[in-house]
Image (cartoon, grey):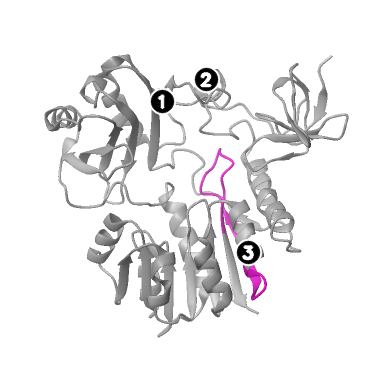
């Protein structure tokens, strides 16, 4: 008989966690805290843990709900991990994920942090990246990966966490896939803060023909607000149809703009009075945090490796002078003026080791660390704790229905 397991929590990747009879932790996708489930035969045993698949919910819990998106159940879509969990329980799970990382990895004696719930639970994503499988034209399958078969792709009809305007664009593009590059590898749809929609086709081989891109753009309603980009695999993107000026579609910006703005406001408020102070904004992207700091009278130096993002940031209106630098943060730190405060918002991999060394070797009075990955945040906090103390931590739900969570940790020099 298959194992029956009590699910006690949600792991960082979104799987439910229980215990097998031998004490090993078992990770089971699409399960909810508080329920008892029967596992399918063929549990994969590892040295200290196991992975199983749900066969049956034996004893349900109030945390389980019916997922509204057909792709979630029928296609086992891997884009979301928590649609089957009630939203309040999602928030509790994310608080626990952050708290566990801080205690287990950073060795900090802290409770689970407060979490700021999302303004919208659905239709919040301003960017959608679609995988591609198959041949040319309409023979391609463009969509998402099933969570248990990452090498395959199912065709996307509608993504319930994506902005309606992006899905309207997708409905227009679907029957015209023959106009996309023949060796399409990935298709990204994005809405920028100016309301325009971007189609970014990543492909190998010949560039996206300008005539095909123009025909695709012309077939879309409100085509004036659509820009088509071609991006060679591992290369720089360029516009092939539509205006080449304006917001750079490949620059980093939060996929949930409204919640991103709420997070930034909290960061800047926590830094307190920065009038006249030098503040570093590392991994600063298009300069949103830098502009808010300048509004408060700070002397801001904002660094990001994306040249297009820096170029756009330099041309945006700012209430005060901001020095924008296109470079990797770890390369330019020795050239920057001594700061009174630092904001870091690194990619998922966390701080570059040289940045950590600079901040730990020459302590700064205040650091705001914005993170999209609790594990790497906790690792970096552990490395910094010799010279800093944690003064505040708060989670923000920028990614409802998924297991991802944004966290801000505030540090002061010890």
**Can you see residue 317?**
yes
Q: Nearer the viewer, mark 1 or mark 3?
A: 3
The picture places residue 156, in percent across and down from the top left corner, at: 41, 23
1 or 3: tag closer to the N-terminus = 1
Q: For the image shown, how many numbered marks are present on the structure?
A: 3
Return the residue at label 1. Answer: 143
Q: Disc 2 versus disc 1: distance between alpha carbons?
A: 11 Å
Q: Which circle marks residue 381 in the picture? A: 3
User: Earlier along the polypeptide chain: callout 2 or callout 3?
Assistant: 2
- Name the element at disc 3: helix
Say which mark, if any, is on residue 134. Answer: none
Classify the position of the C terminus by image quarter: bottom right
Query: What is the span of residues highlighted in magenta in the rendered image?
Result: 384-407
Secondary structure of the residue carrying tag 2 is loop
Q: Residue at x 54, y 34 (%)?
A: 80
Left or right: where 148 falls relative to 197? right
Residues tagged 2 and 3 counted as in contact (Cβ below 8 A): no
Looking at the image, which is closer to me, 152 or 55? 152
Which SS class for mark 1? strand
């Amino acid at each position: 008989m298959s194992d029956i397991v009590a699910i006690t929590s949600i792991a960082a990747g979104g799987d439910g966690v229980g215990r097998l009879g031998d004490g090993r932790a078992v990770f089971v996708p699409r399960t909810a805290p508080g329920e008892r489930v029967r596992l399918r035969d063929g549990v994969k045993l590892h040295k200290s843990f196991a992975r199983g698949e749900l066969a049956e919910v034996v004893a349900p819990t109030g945390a389980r709900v019916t997922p509204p998106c057909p792709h979630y159940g029928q296609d086992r879509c891997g884009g979301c991990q928590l649609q089957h969990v009630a939203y309040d329980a999602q928030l509790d799970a994310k608080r626990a994920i952050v708290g566990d990382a801080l205690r287990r990895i950073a060795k900090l004696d802290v409770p689970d942090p407060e979490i700021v719930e999302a303004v919208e639970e659905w239709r919040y994503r301003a960017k959608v990246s679609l995988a591609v499988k198959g041949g040319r034209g309409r023979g391609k399958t463009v969509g998402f990966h099933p969570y248990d078969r990452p090498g395959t792709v199912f065709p996307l009809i509608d993504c319930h966490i994506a902005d309606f305007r992006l899905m309207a664009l997708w409905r227009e593009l679907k029957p015209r896939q023959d106009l996309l590059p023949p060796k399409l590898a990935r298709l990204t749809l994005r809405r920028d803060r100016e309301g325009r929609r971007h189609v970014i086709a990543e492909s190998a081989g010949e560039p996206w023909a300008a005539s095909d891109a123009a025909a695709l753009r012309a077939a879309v309603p409100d085509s004036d607000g659509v820009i088509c980009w071609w991006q060679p695999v591992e290369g720089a993107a360029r516009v092939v149809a539509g205006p080449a000026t304006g917001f750079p579609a490949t620059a980093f910006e939060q996929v949930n703009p409204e919640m991103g703005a709420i997070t930034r406001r909290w960061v800047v408020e926590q830094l307190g009075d920065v009038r006249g102070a030098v503040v570093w904004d590392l991994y600063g992207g298009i300069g949103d945090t830098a502009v808010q700091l300048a509004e408060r009278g700070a002397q801001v130096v904002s660094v990001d490796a994306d040249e297009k993002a820096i170029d756009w940031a330099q041309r945006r209106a700012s209430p005060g002078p901001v020095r924008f630098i296109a470079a990797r943060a770890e390369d330019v730190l020795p050239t920057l003026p001594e700061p009174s405060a630092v904001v870091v918002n690194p990619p998922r991999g966390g701080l570059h080791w040289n940045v950590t060394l600079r901040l730990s070797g020459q302590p700064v009075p205040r650091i705001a660390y914005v993170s999209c990955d609790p594990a790497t945040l906790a690792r970096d906090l552990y490395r910094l704790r010799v010279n800093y103390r944690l003064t505040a931590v708060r989670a923000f739900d920028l990614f409802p229905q998924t297991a991802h969570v944004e966290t801000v940790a505030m540090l002061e020099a010890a």
